[in-house]
Amino acid sequence: MAESNQRTARAQEASKAQKAQAGAAKAKARQEEEALLRADTFTNAPKVSRRTLTKEERAALAKQREAETKEAEKIASAWSKGGLGRWWARLQSSPDKVTWGMAIVALGVVYGDIGTSPLYTAQTFLAGQGGLGSVNREAVLGMLSLVFWSITLITTVKYVLIAMRIDNNGEGGIFALYSLIRKYGAWLAIPAMLGGAAFLADSVLTPAVSISSAVEGLQTLPPLEGLFDENPSLTLMITVVIIVILFSVQSRGTERIGKVFGSMVLVWFSFLAIVGVTNLSNDWSVFAALNPVYGIKFLFSPDNAAGIALMGTVFLSTTGAEALYSDMGHVGRGNIYFTWPFIKVALVLNYFGQGAWMLANSDNPQYTAMKSLNPFFQMMTPNVRYLAVILSVTAGVIASQALITGAFTMVSEATRLNWMPHLQVRYPARTRGQLYIPVVNGVLCVATLAVLAIFKDSEHISAAYGLALTITMITTTVLLGVHIWHSGKRVGAIVFTVLFLAIQAMFFIASMAKFLHGGWFTMLLTAAILFVMYTWNEGTKLERAQRRHMRPNDFLPALDKLHSDFRIPYFADNIVYLTSDSETKRLDTDIFFSIFADHPKRARAWWAVSVETTDEPFTREYSVENFGTNYIYRVRFRLGFKVSQSIPAYIHQIMHDLSKTGELPKQKSIYPKVDADPDIGTIRYVLIHKALMPESKVSARGALSLQAKYAIRRMAGSPVKWFGLAPYNPLVEVQPLFVSTRRPPRLKRTDTAKTIPTPTPTRAVADPAAVPDPMDTTSGLGRLVQELDAAVSAEERKIAETAAAAAVAEQGDKGKAKNGKPAAKPQRSAKQKR
């Protein structure tokens, strides 16, 4: 009885000890888990919210819905007010709708460049004719006639009435136009690239010439004349400061800038009109220049001292036309239609007012002897001139803004065409058309400052200004003619193309007179931008020609084998590949060979992730294809253009979602990680870059394009920053670009002095190296894996049969030994002997 009690007591003590040990183990595990969870307090890793929209985004969408509701109510109310109301309702329901707010933005964003042309057009005309004393009535009326009809034909007819009716989902510009018609011929890429490069080159010169010419107006103020005489570089310093400030505020968005500038432009053009009318009151006869005969007659007159180069001066009055078309996506076509009549009237009144002043003072010795006379400032009284200088500086800044926003749009369109590297794009405003590209902003700022450093003042900068833009206008005319032709209006296409090519060819020939005086810089800059576009396009074509996709039955056998091969340690629990390939039903060979390159990258799961940017601002969606497995996933994000690409946080969300649904096996981290997520295993991000092999059979032009593309990519910035992966130590791999290769000749052995023994015949032994490798992915992968499995199974059966035969023999020997006979010595098998 006592022994029984003792055994019971010992059992209870053992049970208590086991419970204590189990409790201690659980407590230790709990401590480890709590320590792992506490890692979040040290890393603050980004996590996704339970909501799909932020508070600010919900407020923005609610405000947008409210505005749409009010607009719908206004349209419905207008519809009930007769024919005029129905017309207004139809207009507001179309792409040509007009809003007062965006009309103000249009004034600030679109018209800055063309609004500064009165500052220097007449001044350049007088300089080309030898001064105010050298011009007569025929010369003034001829210049005014050419200016009026150039603005009417180029800006009003070509761009406002024709080009702006041809848009690509609301976007304008030469690249958007090319996207519509590129299906009609590969050769259309040539004028599109050339015109885009010329426009971007001119975008560098516009801020320099517009702002510097306006700042130089300070020199005409009597109290400041002595200060500028003592400090000749003061004008340049003021211009540099204004340009740096202008580029530094671009990140705030063109909508905010446009609203600030819009009211200023309204004042500026009103001022132009009032000043023009004031001087016209002395001589209304200058409106005889509306007759185009005056312009044509003076152009070919012997009294024209500038000759055909006069058209280069006239062209300065139309320099903002191409920017007007490019900025259409920023403000909407209807708002430009609504504001352009006011802009044109103000310009014409000011030009004709300057003409009236020149006729009234052509015999005034005070002005005939003046060096670099500028009629724009001289036709005002000294008191008004102070206001004119302030407003002109503001207008110069706004002119620069028009070209900067146009450059952002052009680069964005070039990126979509794969003519430029994928740069980080921000959308500070509520519409996708208003964007900001930090790299382009920085390059434009540096290039503009370089122009100022080279040319010093507006007189020398204007020698290079406008030459490249004539190329853009000519190429735009060619592309518009092709679009009109394929729209079925063939007679109209011929008339349009011949008429505008003839006019713009004269502009180009006249502008070429500026080549040696500064135009060389513009052409050099155009050639550099064109080189970037061409090499990037050619390099992309070569890379896409190499890209291959694998079907599931081609890549799944190898991945399944690697996934279950316990001899190979895990490279990471999850390997995430970032790719630009949008194919979701197949796998890019670049990812497949990356997994098996060198030492195979075994993982619990492989992920191929691509990102698509939508036209809606706040879209957050994803789709997954797992190919019927639980270890390979093809993920495609659809993110709105205002949504930051927080790929690591979204990847964690997707892994948690798939784990909850059972599509992804449970993963558990036992050690702290940077992402502080114990429910998901380790993640390694991989990006793949391409490199050209020395043996590649590629032309010299193709090799140059690829080398240039890779150099540009290094300078443009790494995709690591675009996807927000820099803190997670991503792996960047370089894979060979398998274009067609040439076989190098065989090597010849030269150590023939040694006697090479003749090999003796031996029994054939299977070479382990000759056994098919399951990781060999060159051809017939699934068949090789099956053959290897069959060979392993046959070898295992053979070994089992040998072991069974040996056991039977041993039992027989033991039986003989029991009968008194010595047991025979067991024979070793051939395999044991070996």
Image (cartoon, grey):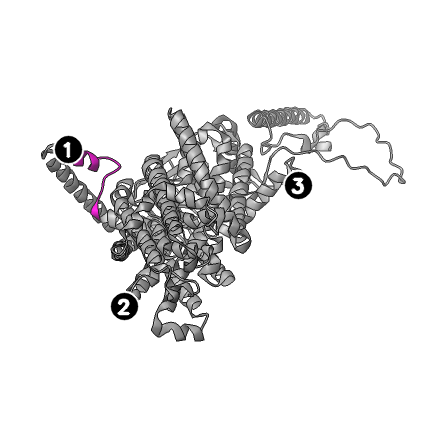
The residue carrying pointer 2 sits among few (fewer than 14), some (14 to 19) or many (20 or more) residues within 10 Å by Cα, namely few
Residue under the image location 55 percent in, 53 percent down = 516
Q: Which residues are magenta?
A: 86-100
Residue 555: assigned label: none
Residue 694: assigned label: 3
Question: Can you say whether 589 is above or below 308 in the image?
Answer: above
Question: Can you say whether 592 is above or below 349 in the image?
Answer: above
Q: CA distance from mark 1 to mark 3?
A: 69 Å
Q: Secondary structure at mark 2?
A: helix
Quadrant of residue 256 within the rendered picture: bottom left
Q: Give yes or no for residue 259 being in the magenta stretch.
A: no
Answer yes or no: do the residues labelled 2 and 3 have beta carbons within 8 Å? no
Question: Can you say whether 253 is above or below 418 in the image?
Answer: below
Residue 383: assigned label: 2
Amino acid type, residue under disc 2 in the picture: Asn
Q: Secondary structure at mark 3?
A: loop
Residue to which mark 1 is pinned: 86
Residue under the image location 67 percent in, 26 percent down = 813
Q: Secondary structure at mark 1?
A: helix
Horizontal and vertical percent position of residue 347:
31, 50
